[in-house]
Image: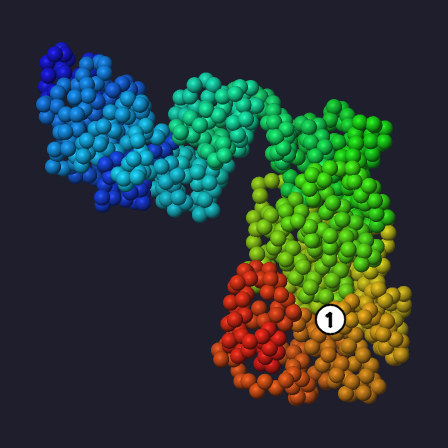
């Protein structure tokens, strides 16, 4: 070993040897060959080959991130070629590292002169050697590129300090590229400040969807974008995962798209790779922690400690993040495992320790509940199939209402509806909490029989118990109110609400503030029950409280349901535009919180309606959608004679039975009105006369069924039968009262008809759908009396009131007597024969003569949309919500419309647009 050749010691056989006497292995100095399926990614190679190269380049990422092949592809195209060194476990000491570093220079065509001196024997590295090496590098005419792969194996403080010295004093003669799984211990902050370092990190190494699609094509797989997106999401763009998936999919007998969507990561070559390259490299305590936290989605060190029974999670997790060991740091000491790594660890845990998974979920549930994280605790309690824990947590925390507002943790419904495991033991039925939760789950699915059975069982236990206090009794009251709504029993709902109000006075205000949905649900159930009972003003008062409540996720469903019920009241009172606006605003808010989209959203592509969009979260849905809002939208469409849209809305409603009497009757009403508009009178009557199961009869449901019957009798030419059908109608059903007046007029009783119209509520209590019909009945009565000026005046009033709402149905229902009056006044009809704006009567302008000509330029369709809503006296904020745009966008459209119409005020813009026939 005393002999030297080119500064390297030689062994007995004359070959160069390293400081411990072993020959240099050629494979350590050769870049790996690129496979045939390698994909060059220009966005990354461009970073490596920047025009002004920096002295240091760091490519840092997890195992299999594609670091080495990326750099090897770039380095293979350099001129002169780069020197390459792959570090392995034998090259961990400074003497071995620098001997191999100099050997890499020689193999790469950039040998250092022998004056640099021989490498030190096994032991410390002489600082003079590093100084001579740096000086020789600094004297080079052209810089030499040295790539050190797997530098994390030699990333010790001493080697890092020596490397920083050579890098600093080697000047422009050295371009060092480090490929590593962990951050080098070099003073990187200095290189960043001086812009002397190029960095490519794990996030940048991840494949984009476009790159993944190109990689799959190289492997002979041409998949749709949605399938590639899903694969990139599951693998987080991890290079090795994508390549292994592609190879397996190509060899699989199944359809590649199906395979990539459904493959089990725990039984794949990916699992072999990660277990060997990541898990088995870790110390036993770290392996144990990783396996245990695989049951968690996101976690903190304290939760990890609860699963391991130790107190070392914080430093272990920090080290795993630093080492790019497939653990992600979300900040504020929150962590998450790489999705594929988690799948594989969980599968490994199940094979290695059967039964441990449920214990870990139970520990996690207890820790999370004690830390005030109820939602996460419930999810783990359900995963542990611990019904007792879940029920007690829900009831104790006054969170049972969340079972009625949804969404729920995955598995919770199965746990309490008798179809899952671990739900039938006596231990779980020991207290009323489990029965209360079972009752809530069944009632949320509108299964009254099962829900009431569990509710009665819980009440029996509470009656004989002194342990369970306010929380359980409050839960009973809420579910009693829910049952009252579902059965159509206002009396039951009122009793439950009174009980709940008394109990709430003993609940701490801070706890109630955490669960606003509890009071909101009580008021919603009470409002719906009052609505069914025909007490519309009382129903509106209860529902208004909810709709004005806080706009939080827990309140999203009660607020939407209350708004839909208020919209139905608006419809019954004759305000279709107001009803539609309520529903759309409520739907927009609900979608922001991830509630399922209503069926009407599917009509966007057909152009029948306008709507926003939303996505549902990966959790079980909550209660079944009520559908009353959908029925109201269909009924409003009928009022506007948009029968195709109304039909589409009704066709997309669920085929299942309506969840409560209000919704059932609302659906019958909307469908019967549509059938009448389509001329199917007998079918309309059949629908209207369908029985709605309920404990109490609804006056408005009965009255509107009678109105349909009366309309059918009039169509049959039987006015006396039409009068008889509405004999019992009262003034609190204004639409039906107008129908009765119309029937009496058809029967020749003009006096009674006008008397009934005089009984209508005063101005502001009934909307245009009622007042327009009333005006048309009065106009027909005036015609029969020969008072033509009154006919014209009343028709003008009806048209003016109908225009902002887009009402057409009242005119089409009025009968043949109306047609001659519309035909003799061309300005009153559009080209399709439908009623037009009443801006003129008998050829004379009804508004002021502006003397203005046509607009300076045509209005856009969106500007017309804004003007139409302006004509309905909607505020700027309301228009923005209705059109799903910002307030500023509405203001921009208004300014443009004002300019084109040569006006400066809202009222002038509406008047001018009407005069020009634009509305």
Graded by Cα atoms within 10 Å as few (under 14), some (14 to 19) or many (20 or more), the crowding at tag 1 reads: many
The quadrant of the image that shows the C terminus is: bottom right
For residue 141, above or below residue 364: below
Q: Identify the image's colour scheme: rainbow, by chain, secondary structure or one colour.
A: rainbow
Q: Judge left or right: residue 479 versus residue 251.
A: right
- Residue 531's x, y, as percent? 80, 55
Give the structural element (helix, strand or loop) at label 1.
helix
> Which residue does the image show at 82% across and 41% down from the upper left?
502
Q: Mark 1 points at which residue?
A: 768
Depth order, front residue of 873/681: 873
> Which residue does the image show at 12% across and 20% down from the upper left?
117
Q: Judge left or right: residue 142 versus residue 266.
A: left
- Residue 416's x, y, as percent? 71, 33
Q: Could you say which quadrant of the image residue 248 lies in? A: top left
Q: Is there any visible trace of residue 112 in the rendered image?
A: yes
The quadrant of the image that shows the N terminus is: top left
Q: Could you say which quadrant of the image residue 215 lies in? A: top left
> Which residue does the image show at 80% across and 61% down from the upper left?
688
């Amino acid at each position: 070993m005393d002999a030297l050749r080119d500064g390297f010691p030689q062994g007995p056989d004359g070959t160069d040897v390293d400081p411990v006497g072993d020959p240099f292995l050629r494979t350590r100095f050769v870049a790996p060959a690129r496979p045939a399926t390698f994909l060059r990614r220009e966005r990354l190679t461009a970073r490596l080959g920047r025009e002004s190269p920096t002295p240091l380049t760091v490519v840092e990422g997890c195992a299999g991130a594609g670091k080495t092949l990326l750099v090897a592809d770039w380095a293979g195209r350099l001129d002169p070629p780069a020197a390459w060194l792959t570090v392995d476990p034998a090259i961990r000491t400074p003497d071995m590292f620098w001997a191999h570093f100099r050997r890499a220079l020689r193999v790469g065509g950039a040998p250092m002169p022998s004056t640099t001196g021989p490498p030190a024997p096994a032991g410390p590295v002489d600082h003079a050697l590093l100084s001579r090496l740096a000086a020789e590098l600094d004297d080079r005419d052209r810089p030499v590129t040295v790539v050190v792969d797997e530098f994390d194996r030699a990333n010790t403080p001493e080697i890092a300090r020596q490397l920083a010295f050579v890098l600093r004093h080697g000047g422009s003669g050295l371009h060092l590229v480090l490929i590593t799984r962990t951050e080098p211990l070099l003073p990187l902050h200095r290189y960043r400040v001086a812009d002397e370092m190029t960095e490519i990190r794990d996030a940048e190494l991840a494949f984009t969807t476009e790159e993944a699609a190109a990689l799959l094509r190289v492997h002979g797989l041409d998949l749709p974008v949605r399938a590639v997106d899903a694969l990139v999401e599951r693998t987080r763009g991890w290079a090795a995962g994508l390549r292994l998936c592609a190879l397996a999919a190509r060899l699989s007998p199944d359809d590649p798209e199906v395979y990539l969507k459904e493959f089990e990561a725990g039984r794949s070559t990916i699992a072999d790779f990660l277990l060997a390259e990541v898990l088995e490299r870790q110390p036993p305590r770290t392996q144990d922690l990783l396996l245990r936290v695989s049951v968690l989605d996101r976690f903190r060190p304290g939760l990890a400690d609860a699963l391991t029974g130790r107190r070392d999670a914080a430093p272990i997790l920090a080290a795993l993040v630093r080492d790019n060991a497939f653990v992600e740091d979300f900040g504020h000491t929150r962590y998450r495992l790489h999705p594929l790594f988690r799948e594989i660890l969980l599968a490994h845990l199940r094979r290695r320790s059967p039964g441990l998974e449920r214990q870990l979920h139970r520990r996690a549930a207890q820790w999370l509940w004690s830390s005030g994280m109820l939602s996460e605790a419930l999810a783990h309690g359900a995963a542990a199939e611990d019904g007792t824990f879940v029920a007690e947590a829900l009831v104790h925390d006054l969170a049972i209402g969340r079972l009625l507002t949804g969404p729920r943790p995955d598995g919770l419904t199965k746990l309490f509806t008798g179809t899952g495991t671990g739900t039938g033991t006596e231990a779980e039925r020991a207290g009323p909490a489990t029965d209360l939760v079972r009752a809530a789950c069944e009632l949320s699915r509108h299964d009254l029989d099962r829900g009431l059975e569990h509710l009665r069982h819980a009440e029996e236990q509470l009656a004989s118990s002194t342990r369970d206090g306010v929380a359980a009794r409050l839960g009973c009251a809420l579910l009693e109110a829910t049952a009252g709504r579902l059965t159509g029993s206002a009396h039951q709902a009122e009793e439950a609400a009174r009980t709940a109000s008394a109990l709430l006075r003993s609940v701490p205000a801070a706890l109630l503030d955490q669960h606003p949905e509890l009071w909101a649900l009580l008021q919603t159930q009470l409002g719906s029950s009052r609505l069914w009972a025909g007490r519309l003003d009382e129903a509106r008062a209860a529902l208004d409280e909810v709709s004005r409540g806080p706009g939080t996720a827990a309140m999203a469903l009660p607020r939407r349901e209350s708004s839909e019920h208020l919209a139905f009241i608006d419809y019954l009172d004759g305000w279709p535009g107001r009803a539609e606006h309520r529903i759309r605003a409520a739907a927009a808010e609900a979608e922001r919180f991830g509630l399922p989209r209503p069926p009407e959203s599917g009509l966007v592509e057909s152009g029948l309606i306008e709507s926003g969009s939303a996505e549902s979260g990966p959790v079980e849905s909550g209660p079944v959608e009520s559908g009353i809002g959908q029925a109201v939208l269909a009924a409003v469409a009928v009022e506007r004679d948009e029968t195709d849209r109304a039909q589409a809305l009704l066709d997309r409603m669920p085929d299942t039975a309506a969840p409560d009497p209000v919704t059932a009757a609302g659906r019958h009403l909307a469908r019967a009105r549509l059938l009448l508009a389509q001329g199917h009178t007998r079918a309309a009557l059949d629908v209207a006369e369908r029985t709605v199961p309920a404990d109490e009869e609804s006056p408005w449901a009965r009255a509107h069924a009678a109105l349909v019957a009366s309309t059918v009798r009039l169509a049959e030419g039987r006015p006396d039968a039409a009068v008889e059908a509405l004999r019992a109608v009262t003034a609190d059903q204004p639409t039906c009262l107008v129908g009765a007046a119309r029937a009496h007029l058809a029967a020749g009783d003009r006096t009674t008809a006008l008397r009934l119209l005089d009984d209508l509520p005063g101005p502001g209590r009934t909307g245009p759908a009622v007042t327009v019909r009333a005006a048309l009945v009065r106009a027909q009565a005036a015609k029969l009396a020969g008072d033509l000026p009154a006919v014209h005046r009343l028709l003008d009033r009806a048209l003016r009131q109908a225009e902002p709402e887009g009402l057409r149905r009242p005119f089409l229902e009025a009968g043949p007597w109306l047609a001659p009056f519309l035909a003799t006044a061309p300005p009153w009809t559009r080209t399709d024969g439908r009623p037009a704006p009443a801006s003129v009567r008998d050829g004379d302008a009804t508004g002021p003569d502006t003397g203005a000509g046509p607009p300076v330029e045509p209005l856009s369709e969106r500007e017309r949309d804004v003007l139409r809503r302006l004509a309905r006296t909607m505020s700027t904020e309301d228009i923005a919500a209705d059109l799903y745009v910002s307030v500023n966008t509405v203001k921009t459209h208004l300014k443009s419309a004002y300019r084109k119409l040569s006006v400066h005020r809202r009222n002038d813009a509406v008047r001018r647009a009407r005069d020009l026939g634009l509305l």
